[in-house]
Structures are given as C-alpha cells and as structure tokens.
Image (cartoon, coloured by chain):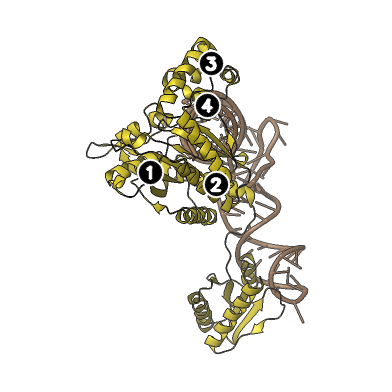
Chain colours: A yellow, B brown
Amino acid sequence: MTEYQLPRGTQDVLPASWRLRARVLDAARARFEAAGFGRITTPTFEHTELYHRGVGEATDIVSKETYTFEDRGGRSLTLRPEGTAGVARAFITHGMHRESLPVKLWYADSMFRYEKPQAGRLREHVQLGCEVLGSELATVDAEVITVQAGIYRDLGLPDLVLHLNSVGSGAARVAYRDALVAYLTPFAGELDADSQARLASNPLRILDSKDARTREIVADAPKLPEFLTEDDRAHFDELTALLTIAGVEYVVDPLLVRGLDYYTRTVWEFTSSALGAQSTVGAGGRYDGLIEALGGKPTPSVGFGTGIERIVLCLEALEAGVPDRTVEAYVGTRPEAGAEARATAFHIATALRERGRSVELDLAGRSAKSQQKQAAKLTTVVRVLVDDFGAEMFLRSGFEGIALPTVIDAAIGQVDAQLTAAAATS
RNA sequence: GUGGCUGUAGCUCAGCUGGUUAGAGUCCUCGGUUGUGAUCCGAGUUGUCGUGGGUUCGAGUCCCAUCAGCCACCCCA
C-alpha cells in the first residue's frame, strides 16, 4: 500500500517526536538568548560558488555530497550543506562589520547532504548552531563552547565528551602540513587507500584515520602542537583556563582535525557513546580566514553546529515509555446523552482553555469506560463527565464522582479551582 | 561511494525443508467483572507478506532486479 515512500534519507517528524525536538529548540533558544545572541535565517539554497569557496573544493561535503541544481534562469544553486558559509555571506551582504563587534548569531535550519543514510545520518537534517563574528579573543571560543555545553546540560544528555584541539593559524598549519607530508611520503604504500589519496589533497585528515596500520604510522608522526606559534599556544591555553572557570570539562585530542577547510586554531567536537558510529553530537571551530576569503574584511570568528536528530536520539535512549502528551483535564459526555450535554461539555472545555488549562474534549463519542481509559492515558488531573442531568468531576485518587453545580460558570470555577489545588500539591 | 544484514497487520514479531481461506502479542473499538481508572474475561476492525519480474501445477517461503531501513567503513551533525 505504500504507493509513495519517503525520499531516501528524509523523515516525517510526528507529534511524538516533536515533543523532544521542541524541548531541544527551547533549551537552545534560552541559552542563546541568555548569552545575547540574535537569531538569523539565511536561504535554504545559495549560489553554488559560495560553498565551493567557503567550505572548500576538496572537502567531501562539497565535492560529493551537495544537492546542486540549475534553476530555470540557468543559475547553479546548491542546497545548504552546512550553516557557516551562509551566515558568513550574510555578514558581508549586510555590512555587519560596521556594527559593534562581535556579531553573535544563532540559527536552526535544515541542512542537505547526499550521503548514505543511517540512524543519525539523514540527507536532510536540522542543525542548530551559532556564529560569533569579529573577535579573535579566546573568551569568544570559551563563551561559544560554554553555551553549547549548557544546552546539552539543560537537556540532561548523558556521557558527553568534549574533544578539543588547536590546529593553529595559517602559517603554523602550512608548516605542519609540509612536515607531515614529508614524514608520511616514505610510508605512502602502507597507508590505507583513502589516506593515500589525502596525502595530496588534505593530509591533515590522515591523522584521524581509523585504519590500524595508518594509525601506527601516524603515532610517530610530527605532532601538531609542536608547530603552533607562541600566539596560537597562548590562545589555546587561555581557552582551556576559561573552560575550567566555566566548569566545562574537556579532553585535549592532538589528533582532532575537522573536515571543513576553513577552521583555524580552535576545533572541538562533542561525542556521545549512545550514538554508535555517528557519535558526534555537535562540533565547531574558529575560522579566522573565512570572511576574508569570501570577499569581506578580515573578521576572526567562531561557531558550532549541532544536529537536532542526534540530540533527540540521545534523549530517546534516555527516556522510553514517557507518554506522548499530557493534559490537565478531560471533559467527556455520556454517549447516551444528547446534544445539550455535548454543548455543556464543549462549554466547560473551551472555558477552561480560556483560563489557560490544557483540556482534552471527547470527540470520538466513546463509551464512558473508554473515556476514562483515555483520560488515564493522558495523565489528567481531573475528569469531567457530562450527561443530561448534570456534570460530575472525578479526581484521580477518589472513587466517587463529585457533582458539579448546575450553573455552568460555577462548575467551571470548581474544576479550575481543583486544578489549581492539585498543581499546588504536586 | 564500499561491504554486510533486514523488509509479513498502527507497533513488536512467528511463519520449518514452497502446498488448501496468512498467525501471535500489543494497540485500538465494543461489552462484562471490579464502587472511577488499572487488572481480569469475552467479541471485533486492520494486511494486495516493500515493489516489479522469473522458476513452478502451486511462492510470504526459491532466483533476479529495484526501492527503503539498519550495521560497519567513508564522511559528518
């Protein structure tokens, strides 16, 4: 019967799943607002060139995972594969370098990558993240990481580990890259196939290869930290000291390199053991050269992105069997009762909602017993049952129905008062 | 992109070596028991066995293709 399947790697987000998503978005918004970030939305697609220049031709994301198409006007456009390039472009487009720097922006939008799907890896996924543009202070790195850690902490994500490293600024990276290539070239034949290819295109990525022999070789390779300049090192040391002040635990991982070309100095990654191979929950880094590379003024910046679906996966692992939705009151009608009783029930339900109560009204014409079951499932505080002779209110703990006043406003008031009393004791 | 596993009612799954009208639990609906609900008992609805070909007298069960999901790699959020 499935005439139409979902396109590969896409999903419908149903109400049960939205409960957790909404919680993630709320936590993020609260943390970003507390830190003075403003929200930004950039287009879902940009000129293809932006991503080639911004993210990097050699990266997998751009070279083999983009959704690129030509529109009816012959322009080459690409669905957003990551968040930073678009925000950087907007920064330039709107001349934000004239504002008081740094500019602090956050977003929550769909990203599109043509990948082979797996749990926690979709072709369209929603990423929330932020960018701070226009300051090279380590304080900014620390603030951004602390906000990210705070979101996870508020959500109660278990067993997250923050991996932290510095890949150095431009000159240091070039020097290290040359040293690494010089060291690895004699071993070229022993490296795994992917790493051999990267020797020319992106040698730093060889550092985090999972191939056993490659790892052995890498173990004796020149170490990136030894190539950092004094300034790089001081920047990193300041960052780690600030994280300690904020109470954010981290692990320095000298082999951590990120897949996007634009990173300089600080790079990091939060991983969770609840996620299998797609263990990265969120990651970020500093990109001091990006804005300039895109034609703006030199603007040192930092940001991170984190996948909502992966966070939700972690949360689901945490809480199974929690009810989909709950409501304070359930208002039903005895099925044999007439239209007048239904009108009374409707009146009570809508009036309670006006008072800010969450109320479910029987819309299915169920039996009285079934309505009680429904009410129990929704974990209501009170259940109201209306028939032609009046309305009764049932408390969760009591056996006996409490007759409500026949004057409807009084009945509503009594239910409302009961809900207030219940809220006070819980 | 590479390698592997899987695809049967809304959900979780059983269907042995191919053989008459395709099953269980759960969920949902109705009824009974119980001074609400839960529990317990009874009844009922839902499936073109992912899709398309092929082999066969006959296929959910074998073969091929295809689509989708999952696992590892790759990559990444």
The residue tagged 3 is A191
Q: Which mark is residue A225?
A: 4
Q: Amino acid at mark 3?
A: Leu
| Disc 3 and disc 1 on one polypeptide chain | yes
| Disc 2 and disc 4 on one polypeptide chain | yes
CA distance separating discs 3 and 1: 39 Å
Q: What is the quadrant of the C terminus of chain A in the image?
A: bottom right
Q: Chain of mark 2?
A: A
Instruction: Please name which of the two marks, 1 or 2, marks the residue nearer to the observer.
Output: 1
The residue tagged 2 is A149
Q: Mark 2–mark 3 contact, CB under 8 Å?
A: no
Q: Chain of mark 3?
A: A
Q: Amino acid at mark 2?
A: Ala
User: Residue A155: horizontal and vertical position, in percent?
Assistant: 57, 52
At mark 4, the secondary structure is helix
At a point 33% along the width and 46% down the height, the residue shown is A43
| Horizontal side of residue A15 vs B16, given as left or right | left
Compare marks 4 and 3 and give the one earlier in the sequence: 3
CA distance separating discs 4 and 3: 23 Å
Q: Amino acid at mark 4?
A: Pro
Viewer-side residue, A250 vs A335:
A250
Q: Which mark is residue A381?
A: none
How packed mark 4 is, by other alpha carbons closer than 10 Å (few <14, some 14-19, many 20 or more), is some
At a point 53% along the width and 11% down the height, the residue shown is A187
Residue A10 can be seen, yes or no: no
Viewer-side residue, A43 vs A88:
A88
Q: Quadrant of residue A399?
A: bottom right
At mark 2, the secondary structure is helix
At mark 1, the secondary structure is strand
Compare marks 4 and 1 and give the one earlier in the sequence: 1
